[in-house]
Amino acid sequence: MNYLPALFPWQWVVLGLVPVGIILLYFLKLRRQPMTVPSTFLWSRTIEDLHVNSLLQRLRRSLLLLLQLLVIAMAALALLRPGWQSSDQQDERLVLLLDTSASMRATDVGEDGSRFEAAKRKIRERIDRMDDTDVAMLIAFNDRADVLQSFTSDRNRLREALERATQTDRPTNLYDALKAAAGLANPNRTSEAGDVQDYQVADAMPAELLIYSDGGFPNVTNFDLENLKATYVPVGTEDAANVAIVAFSAQRNPETPEDVEAFARVANTGKEPQLLNATLYLDGQFQDAIELDIPAGEEVGAPFKLQTADAAELKLVLDVTDENGTPVIRDDLPIDNTAYAGIAPMRMVSVLLVSPGNRPLELALQTPAAAKVCLLETVPPSYLESDKYKERAAGGLDDLVIYDRCAPEQMPISSTVFIGSLPPVDWQQDELTSPVLLIDIDRTHPVMRFLELYSLQIVEGQPLVPPKNSVELLTADSGPMMVLSPRDGYQDLVIGFEILSSTPEGSVFNSDWPVQRSWPVFVLNILRHLGGAVDSSSTASYPPGETVAMRVDNRLKTVDLTTPTGRKLTVPVSPGGHVSISDTDQPGMYSLSKQGLPLGVFTINLFDVQESRLERAAVRQIGPVAQFDTEYVVTEAEDGDAIAAAMLALDAGTEPQIKSWLESGVVRKNDAPAAAGSRVRSGDRIKIIDEARENAILRAEEGSGEVAARGELWRWLLLAALGLLAAEWLLYTRRLM
């Protein structure tokens, strides 16, 4: 016998004062009334009471007091919750796994509406068939497992947990669900201590694992089921039809960023060829359409070309219905008929300009095109001596640092541009030459693209002697004048001549480049390809539910996230400009911004051929034992074949499995045992059984097992207290009468 007290110590003290209070009330009760009578012969007890005035006299035998104290005692015992460990006979222990992945949205199940609702109906029916001594638990799974209800014999709890299960758009991963089921199948305690449904399960107790799914998951052969007896309960039909977008992306042309190429792959997972249109929308407006002829079980490409210099949202829709909503083709899964791709704006880059004064350079960094991608800060060369700069450079807080006629003591953790100066290490210069005559330009490099520089006039410059693995972009008759060199993942661009030169009279032009049309183009190329503004031209796509990591300007503390439904969230920015986004269950376009300025976009798409392939799997390998559908029907193609060859052709299992099943006698042909060497005819029904597992759903009289459970008396004690209270009330009312 053990106890699980239901009250705190101070509450027990209050309860202990209740019987004391009842006794005190009896002390205060008036026991005598003055009366005038002709004789005291009949009042001997009253006379006796006058002579004996003590506390014990006041508490002489009282049945009412006894009943009242017994009621309090029964209530106190009930609150102590006395109990013991007993063995309950249980017919079944069930682990119910419900598939909530995207493919369960398929509508090929008739009145149920979707495979998900059909699976819920089957589980609900299985719960209704449970006996009072059966226990079950419910786990919903997609690419992760969610335990909705631990082991309980309370069918209402299981029904409520089933109603809490929700459909998702996530992919399927059965492995995590199996790990959760195995971990919870034999817990030391399956619910809170003292719960009346608290079943403490003995080691190695077998449990039925029922997997309600359409089989849209790969075989799990590297998982040891141990004492779990797994049964795959198929949901859906074998002739489901579906067309799906399995890939969609948009990419800017590196040479002409305004030109965008979009490409999609569309799969037909059904058994019939499909002819349909794919329509492309740009920011909600019709852009283009293409006709697709997709053979059964094949994929085709869908290319599109468009132009936009700004951020934009692309949406590709498979037209499976006409304008009136009438189906053009059969399609049982709508979610994969729409895909999204984002054309991101040029990424905002943080630029630090260190210069004694260079108005042409500042203007080029502030043109409308540059302002879309550049967050500029200008400081004098004296700033290089400050602790703030040293901390900034060591932390890599800037995407690009431009040193105009100055140089730091140590290189920053950023890409750099040096104008008329040299990096502190590995660089040298030859003697000053004047004038500088250009003889070669590397126009193939992104930094020099679209530049016409042969007419460029340079008063004087110093040829560069760069480190190894450098690229000469601009060469004069005296040597290299512009060189790009890699450095530990960063790039250093060094220009061997000044744009503005300082003289005693003030600043003078050392080159006419700032007045040429190529100057702002050159600065924009630097921002795009050295600062990294063009890195995010094509947005990434992630599956539903995946945590997305993005990088923004590292000076921002928070950014605004807009979800596909229009909901706005504030997301913190980690050091280094990293943003982590986990609320990604809804397919569509997600955008990051700050005070209306776009910072980046990403998309959530299904893009999972396995989820889009709706043909219900008849066999699934889970652990070392295969799971089976009800039966396989021999077709004309297998007529006259040996039963082993026919089963292999019908995908009833692998060759070693089929051989093992035939030898063990678990194969049935037309409901009769099938011999290993027998042959089949068209129309024969083949069924594979496992006598220890067959009919796991309908079985109700499997050999029972003993499960340790806690037996308790509190219900009976409360009933006894209520009975005593009723007896006390009847006795009291009879005395009044």
Image (spheres, rainbow, N blue to C red):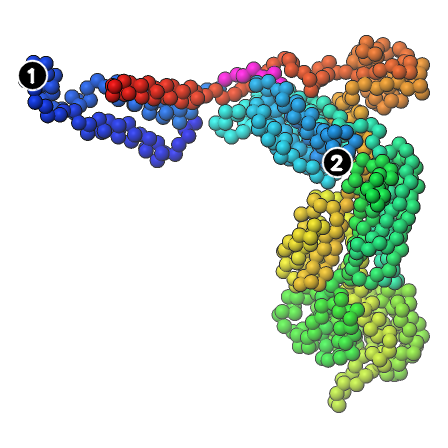
For marks 2 and 1, the one nearer the N-term is: 1
Labelled disc at residue 665? none
Q: In this view, does 691 lie to the left or right of 94?
A: right
Tag 2, which secondary structure? Answer: helix
* Residue at screen point 83% across, 67% down: 525
Q: Residue furthest left?
A: 38
Q: Is residue 121 above or below residue 568?
A: above
Instruction: Determine the CA span between mark 2 and mark 1.
Output: 95 Å
* Residue at screen point 35% across, 20% down: 726
Between 617 and 476, the one lying in front of the other is 617
Q: Name the residue under label 1.
A: 40
Q: Name the residue under label 2.
A: 105
Q: Position of residue 268 (x, y in %)?
A: 87, 38
Q: Residue furthest bottom?
A: 505
What kind of secondary structure does the magenta stretch mostly adopt?
A: strand
Tag 1, which secondary structure? Answer: loop
Report which quarter residue 462 is drawn in: bottom right
Q: Is residue 148 left or right of residue 471?
A: left
Q: Is residue 73 left or right of residue 455?
A: left
Type of the residue with mark 2: Arg
Q: Is residue 577 visible?
A: yes
Q: Can residue 250 be seen in this view?
A: no
Start and end of the magenta stretch?
86-92
Q: Is residue 663 above or below residue 538?
A: above
Q: Nearer the viewer, mark 2 or mark 1?
A: 1
Between 356 and 432, the one lying in front of the other is 356
